Image: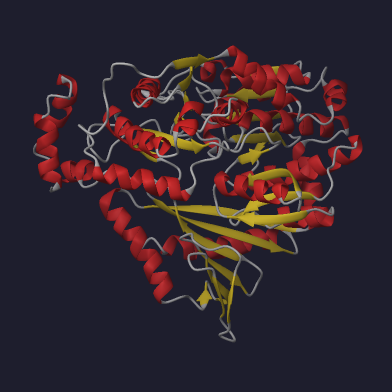
Amino acid sequence: MSYRDTYEAWLASPVLSPEETAELEAIKSDEKEIESRFFSQLEFGTAGLRGTMGMGTYRMNIYTVRHATQAFAQVILAEGPDAVQRGVAVCYDCRNHSDEFARAAAQILACNGIPVRLFESLRPTPELSFAIREYGCIAGINVTASHNPKEYNGYKVYWEDGAQLPPQHADEVAKIMREMDVLTGPALGCAAPAPITEMGEETDEKFLANVMAQVNDKAAVEKAADTFKMVYTPFHGTGYKLIPEALKRLGMKHVICVPQQMVIDGDFPTVASPNPENPEGFYLAVDIAKQEGADFILGSDPDADRVGIMVNTGNGGFKVLTGNQTGVLLLDYLIGAMKRVGRLPENPVALKTIVTTEMARKVAEVNGLKCFDTFTGFKFLAQKKDQLEGSGEGNVIMSYEESYGYMLGSFVRDKDAVTAAVALTEMAAWYAGQGMTLYDALLALYEKYGFYSERTLNLVMPGLDGLKKMAQLMADLREKPPVEIAGVAVKEQKDYKDGSVVCVECGSKSQMELSGSNVLRYEMADGTSLIVRPSGTEPKVKVYILANGESKEACDAKVEQYAAWAEGLKG
């Protein structure tokens, strides 16, 4: 069927409510809008679904949620009766329609004879990962679009280990979805549905007990607690309850929450984007921090899996730390704290993704830890952790990626802003006890480990044309690999799709350990790494610039030089 035929079928369908039909009627004369909504189904990948909300096969709505859930139910049923009886945990965030979508998913599963554990109200993403593991579920579903703008919603799917769905299962879900009609495929009614059990405070307490078990040096917090102040914002999202509670249990006496942003609201009225990566979202927190004389600011994204911080520079100003900088500070601190209290395990390991700063490797290796890279995404970090610990090769003390995600402990297999908030606060309090801000601490790390600077550029390419443009850009770079970028020679061209490494000067080829991902990397003659990667969840190509040098100024100059090249890729 053509996109126009699909549109007409939806318009005539008795399944839709009058309001939903009216929404489609309103675009009757807008061919481009009809095409953008119906040219395809939303693509199901290892991160599940994500898209703008609205009527259409290429939009997030109750029908696409039911459709995906029916396909996922069939994958679970194929695992056999024992797997089915373990059931599925379902969670949701603060976004518009999230609770409605989560309940729809629960009903579809129940109608397929699959028991459901549904959170009674919105909860952080890491608590879902925890619940899957804690209750021995076969899988989990989380209705969230993480840090995306308010127009978006999403549908993340997890497997029994608490990590996002393995590729083979995601491929099977996608295949079933393609074979099934979005409106009429799902099993909407049944005589004897499986039970839907609510989860609430009991699960919160179990989760928090695990979070607090990650604390290394509570005495450092108690020492600084009378004078140490911090500001916290959940950006209208799910961190509003558990993060302040965890900080209280840590021993913090002065946690000042941003009142306007403690209000649950899927329209995110106080920010253009509820993303802790965007410093402009912290303006209310900065005002309060300056009034109160706070030491640092912490913000979690709407589903509380990412966390960002701003630090007092000592002169009345607040500076945003990047995810790379925050991760390096935390890794260095954890190694030191674990050594102090005798908790550093045998064969300690740090994990990071291929696009995360190389400074993390330097910190790890100088301190006697191994550091391994994985593809972007916590399912890969979780997989590597399980592999290393299962084989006895290493014990992971921290996993992180540059986009503000951190995973500590063994009770979750996804990024976790709740535990990270506790660890970062402990670290900030410890440094306060040494008479240092986190900004002072970062400068001291550069002196100790060398100077590094990074930048991520987002080349936004919206709509159907954008998808074609993104694919064309990657194809062009593969067809004519650059031998020089911004006037600097390319030393090595790496293609993570086939794992190939080409030495530009000598022409020799070799293989990397990692392969199977649509990512290109260029190792430059000046020591800079450039990585080009289409986003799996948003209409953009990301370019990562990872520089190091003799001074901060030299690093920053390299970043500027390559950023101009990256901007030119957009065409």
Please state which of residues 413 and 360 is positioned toward the viewer in this rendering: 413
User: Which percent across, then down, holds residue 448?
Assistant: 83, 54
Q: Is residue 285 left or right of residue 230?
A: left
Is residue 322 at all visible to an observer of this figure? Answer: no
Please state which of residues 111 and 371 is positioned toward the viewer in this rendering: 111
| 558, above or below 198, in the image | below
Please state which of residues 272 and 201 is positioned toward the viewer in this rendering: 201
Q: Please identify the residue farthest to the bottom as the structure is shown.
A: 506
User: Which percent across, then down, holds residue 320?
Assistant: 63, 39
User: Which percent across, then down, holds residue 20?
Assistant: 19, 25
Quadrant into which the C terminus falls? bottom left
Q: Residue at x 44, y 45 (%)?
A: 169
Q: Please identify the residue farthest to the top as the structure is shown.
A: 201
* Image quadrant where residue 273 sits: top left
Q: Is residue 149 left or right of residue 418?
A: left
Q: Residue at x 57, y 26 (%)?
A: 131
